[in-house]
Image (tube, rainbow, N blue to C red):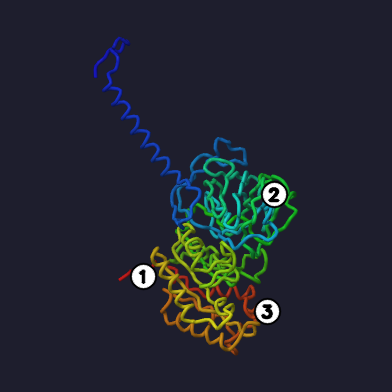
Amino acid sequence: MTGGRDGGAGAPTAKHHALLAAVIAAIVAVSAAIYVGAAGIPSGLYGDGAGDRTTLADGRDGGKGRDGRGNPAAPASTGTWVSSWAAPPVGGEPGTEMTGLADRSLRNVVHTSVGGTAARITLSNLYGQSPLTISHASIALSAGRGDAAALAGSMRRVTFRGQTGVVVPAGAQVTSDAVRIAVPHDGDVLVTTYSPTGSGPVTRHTYARQTSYAAAGQHTGDTTGAPYTEESAFWRYLTGLDVLSRDSQGTVVALGDSLTDGSTSTVGANNRWPDVLSDRLREAAAAGRDIPRYSVVNGGISGNRVLADGLGRPAENPSALKRFDRDVLGRTNVKVLVVDLGINDILRDPDLADPDAVVGGLKTLVDRAHARGLKVVGATLMPFGGHRGYTDARETVRQRINTEIRAGRVFDAVVDFDRALRDPYDPRRLRPLYDSGDHLHPSDRGYTRMAESFDLDDLKGGAPAQL
């Protein structure tokens, strides 16, 4: 190219224009690719079970600024996205079919497995019959164990594709943008949503063993717990909390029934066996043991079965086979699956359960996990002698299933809950120390013993090679 520096050069040619346009287009394309790759922005709605997103976080606030309730716009530090807390949606909340919970702020209290430098949430409208409008959402650290008040300075606005609100279609779920917030391990987090209009039935996880809260009006940004005068024994809409962790390498999902959900454990104590297993992993890592640095999230649903669904469309309390993609593969960066299922298949079958069918269902879960590279640890079925559903015939079915599990013909590794908790003087029953009193569910000490019975080395490695 030629031309003077005094402005006397001739006009650029069409060829020059084309070259300049091509250079600009290339710069824009490269810049966009760098931004998207660094941001790791969730796609919003998803339903294919894909959950492995291990990129930089982007805490966008849509230009709202950093006023203490904002969502800082600068990308957070590097790390690995993992699930820190989860609760499968179980069904629609009775009494909310017509109006939902319009003009209400719902403050869910959840307990983290691992901490991180950023967080994102997943909201579900699976059982809703109309679109769910969330106009405001926030995340904060609890000022105290299970308190509705937020720790000073921790309140952050949650956005969805840069917007403060989102509409979740009936039957769908949505994941938020990443929010830069220092989330602690083994801590309580407050996730608050506000819906200006009704969209019933409200999707919930029924037996939380944790007190959450509700307030009339829009109070998502309130740090005080004063407006939150209503208490709730279940989690509403919220089904997942991911964190960007510098320490954790992946996620363990515990797929189970009420024995995993923590039924009969002390409310607010976080003494379900997945909670205690998470503590064991963290303590072992701190002591320098060569064990995986994993989070542990709870995929238990009380009453859940391997084979049979609950009633309704969509089915409330869907079988493990039906919910596997959503509640296992849909969690973030899953590495290991732990399965503790089968008791309800025995207890709730109007006829005598077929042990071969239950074992076949468990093997199908394992095959699907292996197809995604997951290692699977399986639990033996604990005794229930003395429970109202006990019969000698059902005990025989339990023993046959346990024989297959112990023989190594079902799972990659076995945790023997039966041997750890049974009464040595009457193996058909739980040891009294570990029995909550209903002869089926453990006491707090029983749940702790379940977690202690794991060999942490069994969580190493992946799915066996396919020959």
Say whether marks 2 and 3 touch (CB < 8 Å): no
Query: Eyeballing the image, is 250 above or below 22?
Result: below
Q: Amino acid at mark 2?
A: Arg
Q: Which residue is mark 2?
A: 104
Marks 2 and 1: which is nearer the front? 2
Which three-letter amino acid code belongs to the residue tagged 3?
Gly
- Frontmost of labels 2 and 3 is 2
- The reply to whether residue 48 is visible in this rendering is yes
Between the residue at mark 3 and the residue at mark 1, the CA separation in whole angstroms equals: 40 Å
Q: Judging from the image, what secondary structure is the residue with disc 1 in? A: loop
48 w.r.t. 358: above or below: above
* Crowding near the residue tagged with mark 2, few <14, some 14–19, many ≥20 C-alpha atoms within 10 Å: many
Q: Closest to the observer: 307 or 392?
A: 307
Residue found 33% across the figure and 69% down from its top:
465
Give the position of the N terminus as an image quadrant: top left
Name the residue carrying label 3: 437
Q: Is residue 285 above or below residue 393?
A: above
State the CA–CA distance, disc 2 to disc 3. Answer: 38 Å
Q: Nearer the viewer, residue 362 or 266?
A: 362
Mark earlier in primary sequence (3, 1): 3
Q: Residue 239 or 5: which is nearer the viewer?
A: 239
Residue placed under numbered mark 1 in the picture: 464
Q: Is residue 108 above or below residue 166?
A: below
Q: Amino acid at mark 1?
A: Pro
Secondary structure state at the residue bearing disc 2: strand
In the rendered image, residue 69, in percent from the top left (x then y), is placed at 62, 42
Residue at point 70% right, 59% down?
Answer: 95
